[in-house]
Amino acid sequence: MKRTKIKDVFKQTETDVKILVKGWVRTRRGNKSVNFIALNDGSTVNNIQIVVDLEHFSEELLKPITTGACIAVEGKLVASQGKGQTVEIQAEKIEVYGSADPETYPLQKKGHSLEFLREIAHLRPRTNTFGAIYRVRHNMAMAIHTFFHQKGFVYVHTPIITASDCEGAGQMFQVTTLNLYDLKKDENGSIDYSRDFFGKQASLTVSGQLEGELAALALGDIYTFGPTFRAENSNTPRHLSEFWMIEPEMAFYEIADNMDLAEEFIKFCIKWALENCADDLAFLQEHFDKELTERLQFVLDNDFKRLTYTEGVEILEAAVAKGHKFEFPVSWGTDLQSEHERYLVEQHFKRPVILTDYPKEIKSFYMKQNDDGKTVRAMDVLFPKIGEIIGGSQREEDFEKLKNRAQEMAVPQKDIWWYLDTRRFGTAPHSGFGLGFERLLLFVTGMANIRDVIPFPRTPNTADF
Amino acid sequence: MKRTKIKDVFKQTETDVKILVKGWVRTRRGNKSVNFIALNDGSTVNNIQIVVDLEHFSEELLKPITTGACIAVEGKLVASQGKGQTVEIQAEKIEVYGSADPETYPLQKKGHSLEFLREIAHLRPRTNTFGAIYRVRHNMAMAIHTFFHQKGFVYVHTPIITASDCEGAGQMFQVTTLNLYDLKKDENGSIDYSRDFFGKQASLTVSGQLEGELAALALGDIYTFGPTFRAENSNTPRHLSEFWMIEPEMAFYEIADNMDLAEEFIKFCIKWALENCADDLAFLQEHFDKELTERLQFVLDNDFKRLTYTEGVEILEAAVAKGHKFEFPVSWGTDLQSEHERYLVEQHFKRPVILTDYPKEIKSFYMKQNDDGKTVRAMDVLFPKIGEIIGGSQREEDFEKLKNRAQEMAVPQKDIWWYLDTRRFGTAPHSGFGLGFERLLLFVTGMANIRDVIPFPRTPNTADF
């Protein structure tokens, strides 16, 4: 007999039929004549209720069926009298695949703190919370690939190991096969990296953007979706040392096209979540964030407000003048803090905001310079609750301007000759942006700590499992 | 006016309409009265022909329009008289975005060797060959996500940085933030990794399988698709130091289910390529592999032959007895070489082959042990031209057997306590397999060198761009 996934059991319209389900026991309760097993197989947050008539099953068989045990149940699917469920299964045959000793199994019925569950990240997918989060995570990845594929974008795998550090997005992890107990040095006392695996010093990438631009200036529209790394010693609920990024890059896009795409993209993802993850979102809303679906719907229903950084700062300064207190000072030229971004979104405009044309001093060398000589054609998408969710820009396509700005910002030309080549040969206007996948997941799941939206978080002093 | 991608120009049925295209010049040729520009924008391997009436354009404007230049062309789409094309564009307005000095631009009209193009991997996406390969690569990634999504699998991001080395698949790259000029040692003279970023020694993953199993034994059906690493000093056309792997893992699958899934999966991908990449495959067939689509169709049309390793070795020994010469010896207990695998596929069965039940000595500790005490429930899928394309197994679900086998194979228990926990608590029969993404691409594109199917290959002494 073929197994039916529990998600499909709930979709089945015909009852009084034989059915085979397999999964893990969430709870078992009952009285002297009948037991009820709540069974979950990971396909949905909802459990199927198994009704066990004790007349037909031995105590010996049932004994190992405790929370966490894995079983197969053959039985009859019937309409359920219980509230909160439409169907249940009357067990006819039960097979126990694996028990879970109640004395040692860490996931008993009672609720566990998210902190405790992080310590047993190898078992936490077995909880309702993490089952829901990982299914949403899967769906967001699928939404992203679907969105770009439908638009004719090419998915490009940019390299993870890199010998250049020119994006300057943060501190890097070194990658080496040198024997650290026997490091050879040259006459100047420098480590001889010609003996290292790649013949030079190598690191883990902080961004695939520059390589993405190489591809966009040949294939047109491309996107990356891969892991990126930061070696900063940041122990915060918003930072990971290893996280996934999506970086689309489009030839012939100017800044307005870039904003249109970013807004369409993120709304597509959120709509996908609402349509495909309703059960999981309802669970997360009930347990973690009462305003979750309201907030998601709010983003869908509103055009993003577009204004310049300069206009944004004026609004913030006016708020300060009227007595609003920010923790950090704000004036033209400063990088905005999350509190400033959220003020614009939540209190002033009451909808998502896209800020453009930032001071060039606080942005990267590759952003297109405006004619005012002071600002660059950057854009940040700001969201309620989390602040910046997307950062991007039109790229500088002019060879001389790009080269000079790189020099001003001390990016060594020998590290970016290949990047400059794209402006030397057949340059084109182009734009792109980056989205931290886990930031998107924080927004879509309503979770507060970024370590809870990636299966095995890597942070300072933590690389377990 | 909105730009039309060249791929969509060829789909347009209406002619004598205004149109705007943008792209890179492949060639420009002509006579005193008319010029023909072959324009490509990366959306398709096919160029659109731009007809330039020299009466309407100045020499000065046309001068920079050489191979590699980037231009925008507004004009009228008309039926073409030329052979090999249905439509062309009569230019009315041309804008030059970027020139490409013929003296220095490396990609001139003439064909270039693949070796040369590897040295300019930042520009090679601008060639027909690499445009085709990268579009096929995108499509295979999309096929993979679509296949698993439709079946209700959850995409799981397993960690890239790991502190354990228990999969044993190969040599690893070390990841560190220690200052190599000032390594602190403890009283035993060992490097003090408590000062390193993760508080212990860390490396780049060689496989996401073990973490994938954790997820499968909670969520049911999962798959990984991410980068993996090998620090072997292998300079061959089949090895990369950084490559992408797909590793599905399924609760409640036994070995036969695993074989069914692997066969269905790979046929789905190949069918997707034939249906969605016809132009690119035709180009690759013409220039690199005359039998390409025939070989792809051959895999689609044939059931994979399933037999045991023992039966396979008997066939190979019989072949040797009849005079067939292999470079490497073959007898029960030896690992099969590519030449043996290809003999079974290409000469004996004349179709793809799945070998099962390998000697336990040549396979990993986590594979399910057969009752004979000698073999494990492994499976390898063997393909024409490339040999092994998929390797997998049913996993050992019995806690004691797994623990003992790990011990016999010297896998330290302290490194795999979390993995063993899945067998201690609610264990279940389960299976999985791994597919090297670039191996699949070698097969689907017909290319011979694995460095040509990944955008920026990492190999010993090479980490450019």
Image (cartoon, coloured by chain):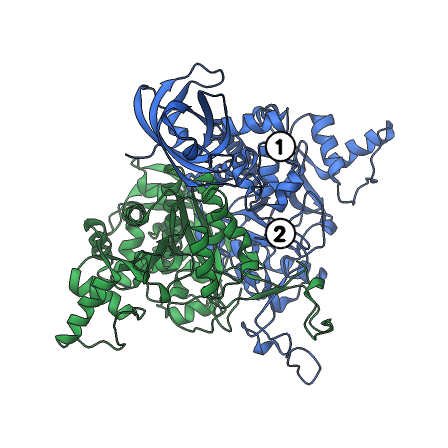
Chain colours: A blue, B green
Residue drawn at point x = 25 percent, y = 72 percent: B331
Query: Chain under label 2?
Result: A
The residue beneath circle 1 is A111
Pointer 1: residues within 10 angstroms few (<14), some, or many (20+)?
A: few
The quadrant the N terminus of chain A occupies is top left
Residue flagged by tag 2: what amino acid is it?
A: Arg
Quarter occupied by residue A351: top right
User: Along the line of sight, which residue is nearer the eye, B256 or B327?
Assistant: B256
Residue flagged by tag 1: what amino acid is it?
A: Gly
Residue A231, x across and y down, in percent: 67, 57
User: Along the line of sight, which residue is nearer the eye, A239 or A465?
Assistant: A465
Residue B442, x across and y down, in percent: 34, 60
Measured along the vertical axis of the image, is residue B192 above or below residue A109?
A: below
Quarter occupied by residue B449: bottom left
Q: Is residue A158 left or right of residue A92?
A: right
Which of pointers 2 and 1 lies earlier in the amino acid sequence?
A: 1
Residue farthest to the top?
A81
User: Along the line of sight, which residue is nearer the eye, B365 or B142?
Assistant: B365
- Label 2: which secondary element: loop
Query: Chain under label 1?
Result: A
The residue beneath circle 2 is A458
Q: Is residue A417 left or right of residue A56?
A: right
For residue B93, say whether it is visible. no
Residue A29, x across and y down, in percent: 51, 25
Residue B375, x across and y down, in percent: 32, 61
